[in-house]
Amino acid sequence: MTITLTKTRMIAGVWEGIFAGVNDVPPQIVVTHQGEQVDGALVKKAAQSDDWVAQVPIPAHLLSDGVQTFVISAVESGETLNSFTLLAGEALAEDIREEMALLREELDMLKSAFRRHCVETA
């Protein structure tokens, strides 16, 4: 059975996820950001079940403008179990505005095509 790690929440700067496919031995994980290991991740028993929970604190010094991706991997196999991405900053706002403009143009094109289709088939 393969191990999976599913996000449950992010709260107070800590990403949390729950493991499936794990027996009595806690899985060992490593978290990386831009190829560098991020310290502080831990795996512990859930308070109200027999599940294992991963907690990954997000260091403030790694937060900056742009896109920041964190990868959670199994130590033994090196397999990627999950990842999360944080977006921030003014540069990002421009990207989102440009993407919204493109989406609006596509929606207008689809509305025109749909109206034309309705007129032609009526």
Image (cartoon, rainbow, N blue to C red):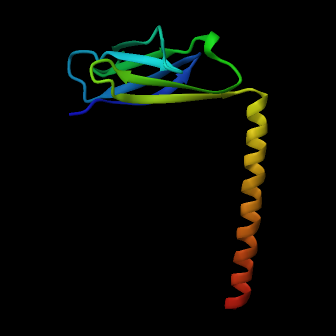
Is residue 76 left or right of 31 when viewed as pictured?
Answer: left
Q: Quadrant of the C terminus?
A: bottom right
Is residue 113 left or right of 59 when viewed as pictured?
Answer: right
Q: Is residue 54 above or below residue 92?
A: above
Q: Quadrant of the N terminus?
A: top left
Is residue 25 left or right of 10 when viewed as pictured?
Answer: left
Q: Is residue 92 above or below residue 60?
A: below
Please name the residue shown 70% across and 76% down the image: 114
Q: Residue furthest top?
A: 40
Please name the residue shown 79% across and 29% down the image: 90
Q: Where is residue 47? Give x, y as percent.
A: 36, 15
Q: Where is residue 102? Give x, y as percent.
A: 74, 54
Is residue 120 left or right of 57 when viewed as pictured?
Answer: right
Q: How many marks?
A: 0
Q: Judge by depth and name the residue closer to the eye, 94 or 56.
A: 94
Residue 112 occupies quadrant? bottom right
Q: Where is residue 105? Give x, y as percent.
A: 77, 60
Please name the residue shown 72% across and 62% down the image: 106
Q: Judge by depth and name the residue closer to the eye, 82 or 11.
A: 82
Q: Where is residue 51? Give x, y as percent.
A: 30, 22
Q: Judge by depth and name the residue closer to the eye, 53 or 71.
A: 71
Residue 120 occupies quadrant? bottom right
Please name the residue shown 38% across and 25% down the image: 18
Q: Is residue 108 above or below residue 21?
A: below
